[in-house]
Amino acid sequence: MEGQQTSNRLIAKNTVMLYIRMIVVMLVTLYTSRLVLAVLGVVDYGIYSVVGGLVGMFTILSGSLSVSTSRYLTYELGRGDFAQLKKTFATVSAIHIILAVAMFIICEILAMWFLNTQLNIPAGRMRAAEWALHCSIACFSLSLLTVPYNASVISHEKMTTFAYLSILDVVIKLLIVFLLYISPIDKLIFYAILGFITAIIYQAIFFIYCWVKFPESKTLPAIDRRIVKEISMFVGWTFLGNAAVVLKDEGVVMLLNIFFGPVVNAAQGIAMQVNGVVTRFISGFMTAVQPQITKSYAQDEATRLNDLLVKSTKFSFFLTVILIFPIICNTRTLLDVWLVEVPDHAVSFSNLILVYTFIDCFTTPLYTAVLATSRIRVYEIVLTVLYFLNVVCSYLALKMGMAPESVFALAILFKFLVLVLLLQQSKRLINFDTRRYFRMFLVRVIPLLAFGGLVSLVYLTFVGNDTFLKFIGFSLAFEAVTLPFIWKAGLTVAERQFVKNIVKERLHLK
């Protein structure tokens, strides 16, 4: 019991640090995005978004390796087998070095072909797009080298360092924007080059920190065939699933470009920035709790694992409601204040993607638990089929002349089907208590959604949301009535007592 309380306190501490990081990152990112859009213009911003999406299609393998590396390092830490931890780190480091070189070459060949033959780039901007592509590929290759080190920081639950490095990253990016104003060359080219320089600085700091703090990171890269065989099977299935996710996400970017051009890509890029703020807000909590989910499985603590899954889902949902309702009800106002020029479709895209994020807060904990088992074949195969159908349906919808918003509506539908799949797999693999889950959904989730919707409807009906001052008023009013509702109706007696204890401990109260 004492060990569980210590783990809970660690989750609480890490969550606080990640939210401090999130607040700083959010404010700087929003301001930076506004300046970048103003300096580059809608067309160049759209070009940068679609080029980034093109490179993003090659993150299929890196995403699979990142998930796999994090799972195996966290699992060995949970077991307390530090000799095996060193062997695992050495092996994944060697794998990532090989892949970084290979993927740089492959990306340069395939991405350049796609850029020059398939994408809709305005006349006179192809050279700038090529520079942006080269720099994006170089950043991607560097990020591959950092995967084992990033996974180590999360596995060791050193979220304070993770928070500081993320803050440093966005501060450097803010400096980059100001340099754009005095750029002696094409602004899009200069922006891409400075982004690459930032990636070099960020990765170097990560390497040095891990080398000093974590003994396993001092191990020289080496291949252990047994570990390679074990990880490769896991990577193979996660690769299939990540391929489907990337195909779905980046496929939407490509489809919007092909059917509507870079201006709509700019709207989609803005919507993703808005969603990124919300996602970082939620992921702050989930990043803190995910290592504990994997370690609970590694230590065969079934009761704690079930408890973590239900509670992490519930808390991530509460955090989502607190942030998303005020944004969805005031999207137009926020974009008018944030941006110099609001692209067409940006408001509707943002709202649809935020609804998609609602479902994400239910899928993430279950996905972590399924990965912890390493028995993911069925899940990854069905996921691939679902997301392939998502892209096909999106293409058909646009081909029939439907609005660009239709692709995001379809993404919401298929994400819900993924949630159903994860519930079924969690029940099969870890004997997850689905009855408790649905009881939590009926008792905690639906009432809060109904309550939040009612509060929003009443406020907007009598007050409106056409100014930023009214948005502030709406947010304050919403939180003032929603937080007490969550405290009384959303939390159990034991959860309320745990929160009180944490607050007393931090404030040094008796």
Image (cartoon, grey):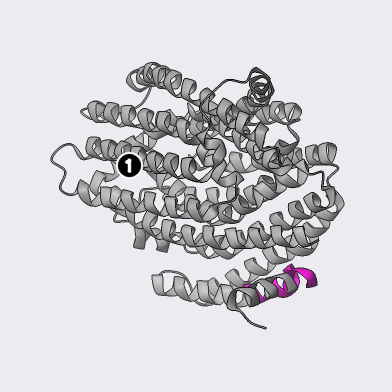
Q: Quadrant of the N terminus?
A: bottom right
Considering depth in this image, is 150 or 448 the residue closer to the camera?
Answer: 150
Label 1 CA crowd tier, 10 Å (few <14, some 14–19, many 20+): some
| Residue 140 x, y percent position in the rendering | 42, 31
- Residue at point 50% right, 29% down? 59
**In the picture shown, does residue 185 fall above or below 442?**
above
- Identify residue type, mark 1: Thr
Query: Residue 486 magenta-drawn?
Result: yes
Query: Residue 131 magenta-drawn?
Result: no
Q: Write down the region rendered in magenta.
A: 482-496
Horizontal relation, residue 58 to residue 241: left or right: left
- Residue at point 36% right, 39% down? 199
Is residue 250 visible in the rendered image? The answer is yes
**In the picture shown, does residue 82 fall above or below 117?**
below
Label 1: which residue?
A: 198
| Residue 208 x, y percent position in the rendering | 42, 41
Considering depth in this image, is 435 or 367 the residue closer to the camera?
Answer: 367
